[in-house]
Amino acid sequence: MTKKLLILGFTGLFSTAAFAADLFVRNNGSGGAYSTISAAITAASDGDRIVIQPKTNGTAYVENLTINKSLTFVSETIYNKYLIQGSVAINPAVGRVVTINSMSLVNNSNYTVTATGPTSGGRTTINIYNSSLNNVTTSTLNTTTNISGCTVQGNITFSHGRITANRAEDIAVYSISTDTSVATSDVEVYGNAINYVLSNFQSSYNFKFYNNFCAHVMINGIKAGSTNEIFNNTVYNPQAGDVAPFYISLNSNTITGAINIMNNAASFVLGATNACIQNESSNANVMASYNLFTNPFVTQGNITQSNNSGQVNMNFNNTDYTISGMNVNAGNPDVSYTDLDLTRNDAGHYGGSNSWSNYWPADSGGKPQVNYLLTPRTISSGTLNIVGSGFSK
């Protein structure tokens, strides 16, 4: 089936914001600008924007940054990133919003982006777009992290937020404690290219894992009484592993919650187990339907099953992140899961409303990038509400 991306024109997908002031950072402080980003941060007030000129010949600003205000960081040169040799530490505070766009850190695991402590009595929001980073760790309490369109050489570890269209080694939703100032939204991880593991180990939020390409999905902790979804992912692992490609082992077997695994396409090399889905938690209500595997369909543990298929002919490419074969039109036939061209759901990361096509256009160039799209499949009366957001590169 040929995929056609549904193009929608509507007001409000991309919005502009008013900033209190623009502070400029340029090489050697030319034109009266600041010569370092740190100096601009010191001079800035909450709500200001710091506009950074990329240095010539790929030269870096050599400094560690501590961000202790609500600030936005952007490149002065359109579609170009500014390079930093150092780490970025964000100090959380109630109501603080930090937005980073078009930042590149020197490729060294010592240079990281971190949230340095929990927020007490409210929430901190961290937005990171179109950046090249090493490791991102923002798993502190009461912190929402939204990351989109980034290349992360290592891991993204966060406690709450929306993570879309990134490349990373691993993505982990992680927090050892429960948020005290709880956000109203779920954890959403959509359309990412993950070399290894996509995991959830937190007890504050429902989670939704949609349309990712990864090697494993591991669930080690959930919110008590939660309803969680693992939909339309492609899971491909050409190396033998110790656990099933979908693995549930909660940190406490007394925690109850639902995990719905549906419309996924997977292939793996047999290792310590031949199970496609493995539930080692007696109280987890795991439901699996319309999932396809190239392996014989085998499960372990208590799982409610329907319409799953094994030994299905499918081809996977974890370099180009493609899938082809009998996954086409093999997902749940209900209209709420239809693809962007309104045909039956394709199992795997191109199927459904949150298709990979939303987040990885064939030639994005310097165009703006969609980082969230929610399009209902049916409407019988009233107003059609479409929710979308994006950012400019």
Image: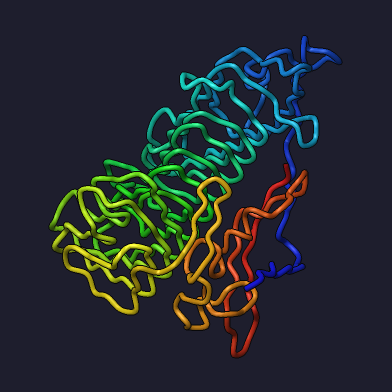
* Viewer-proximal residue among 47 and 289: 289
**The N terminus lies in quadrant:** bottom right
Occupied quadrant, residue 54:
top right
**Tally of numbered discs:** 0
Picture layout, residue 365 above or below residue 28: below
Q: Position of residue 291 (x, y in %)?
A: 38, 69
* Viewer-proximal residue among 236 and 47: 236
**At 65% from the left edge and 28% from the top edge, which residue is drawn?**
45
**The C terminus lies in quadrant:** top right
Left-right relation of 162 to 262: right
**At 60% from the left edge and 32% from the top edge, which residue is drawn?**
132
Left-right relation of 273 to 370: left
Residue 149 is at least partly visible in this image: yes
Residue 185 is at least partly visible in this image: no
* Viewer-proximal residue among 288 and 255: 288
Left-right relation of 352 to 289: right
Picture layout, residue 272 above or below residue 54: below
**At 39% from the left edge and 30% from the top edge, which residue is drawn?**
117
Q: Position of residue 326 (x, y in %)?
A: 48, 71
State the colouring used for the structure image: rainbow
**At 38% from the left edge and 52% from the top edge, which residue is drawn?**
182
Q: Residue furthest bottom?
A: 380
Q: Position of residue 367 (x, y in %)?
A: 77, 48
Q: Position of residue 142 (x, y in %)?
A: 40, 43
Occupied quadrant, residue 107:
top right
Q: Residue furthest right?
A: 31
